[in-house]
Image (cartoon, helix red, strand yellow):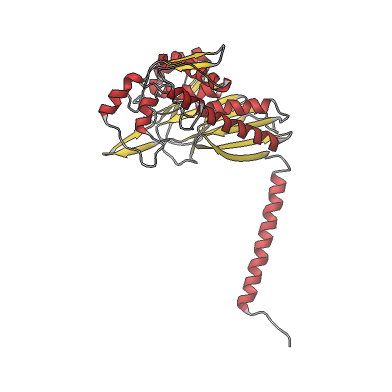
Amino acid sequence: MKQTLSLPSLKKWVMIVCAVLILMTAILSAMLLFPKNSQGYEATTWAMGSYVQQTLYGGDEETTATKASTSVTELENLISWRVADSDIEKLNSAAGTEWLELDERTIQVLEQALSVAESTDGAYDPTILPVSALWNFDAEEPTLPDDEQIQRFLPFIGYEFLRINTEDNTASLRNHGNGVDLGGIGKGAACDIALDVYSQSDITGGIIAVGGSVGVYGSKPDGTDWRISVRDPEGKLTDGLGVVSLDEGCISTSGSYEKTFTENDVTYHHLLDAKTGYPAESGLVSVTVVHQSGAISDALATACFVMGMEKSLPVLKELGASALFIDEDHHITVAGELNFELTGSGYTVSRQSL
């Protein structure tokens, strides 16, 4: 007996055929728009409380990405005060007692941290742990610490309490109660570590993002500059305000929107002023810094946020950095030689020479 498809069955088969055709069209379109290797090799891992995203071009991309990711994780296990038996955990535990021999990578980050601390008069201070631990912005439900606690631990903060000897890779903290927190420099330092891996590989270009820090190496296949999106402080995570074009170096952003909590109708952010123990009030909502070093750009972004724009300008000039300041009045100031293109709306832009 001859069989015929019912109307519902016919519709089902038509839908399947259409879906297959649409999928084939999408694949063909992708092949035409993005020839083999034009997008590079992409890898996403997790370290330092953030996604680590890499896009590499040319050479053995997969092996290089794996080595870079491993290097970032190794650095975290050295410099995070939260990791048991890390260099920094040991250094903090030995505060006020003895000098410790640390990994060369740890010493390098500590040296960079002290350099920025000295240049900014402590606006960025790696010894902020006694107070930053009270705030604990990484907790699921942060709470406002008592002012009495803050005032009690404030005297233990001071970058002069951290001492390092680069000749024998040793370091110490002067007093019991001192503590190092490298959260404000670690992600930038991770970019430096990855870029060093790239430079020792055969890849032709690469970009790595660790939280709010991004590092670029070599060139893109089409020869154009790397374009890094700057987030709109009042938008969603994916809302871009503008684009910074880079041909080399690193870029880091610190913003009051990154880690916050609200208590008694007051919103508190994680960028603490080491002199007061409370979130900085500088009239800024975001600072983006470009520098050859990821560690320096990261620490400077925090320092400039705390200091405010006017005090930041001579420091940027001294350290050879450029910056993008976004204030509470929706004004953007481009300081130094920075290639910035505004793509969002609701903001005004001016330029400031250094």
- Residue 92 is situated, as x and y percent measured from the top left of the image, at 43, 24
User: Is 268 in front, or is 282?
Assistant: 268
Q: Quadrant of residue 330?
A: top left
Q: Is residue 31 above or below residue 257?
A: below
User: Is 250 in front, or is 222?
Assistant: 250
- Residue 168 is situated, as x and y percent measured from the top left of the image, at 56, 13
- Residue 80 is situated, as x and y percent measured from the top left of the image, at 49, 29
Please give the name of the residue rendered at 43% of the width and 40% of the height, measured from the top-left corner: 235
Residue 353 visible within the image: no
Q: Quadrant of residue 52?
A: top right
Name the image quarter holding the N terminus.
Answer: bottom right
Please give the name of the residue rendered at 51% of the width and 25% of the height, measured from the top-left corner: 87
- Residue 163 is situated, as x and y percent measured from the top left of the image, at 46, 14
Q: Is residue 41 above or below residue 293?
A: below
Farthest residue, direction front:
97
Q: Quadrant of residue 339?
A: top right
Locate residue 245 relative to residue 278 in the image: left or right.
Answer: right
Number of numbered labels in the structure image: 0
Farthest residue, direction bottom:
1
Residue 109 visible within the image: yes
Please give the name of the residue rendered at 65% of the width and 32% of the height, measured from the top-left corner: 206
Please give the name of the residue rendered at 34% of the width and 34% of the height, measured from the top-left corner: 268
Locate residue 223 relative to residue 353 in the image: left or right.
Answer: right
User: Is 290 in front, or is 243?
Assistant: 290
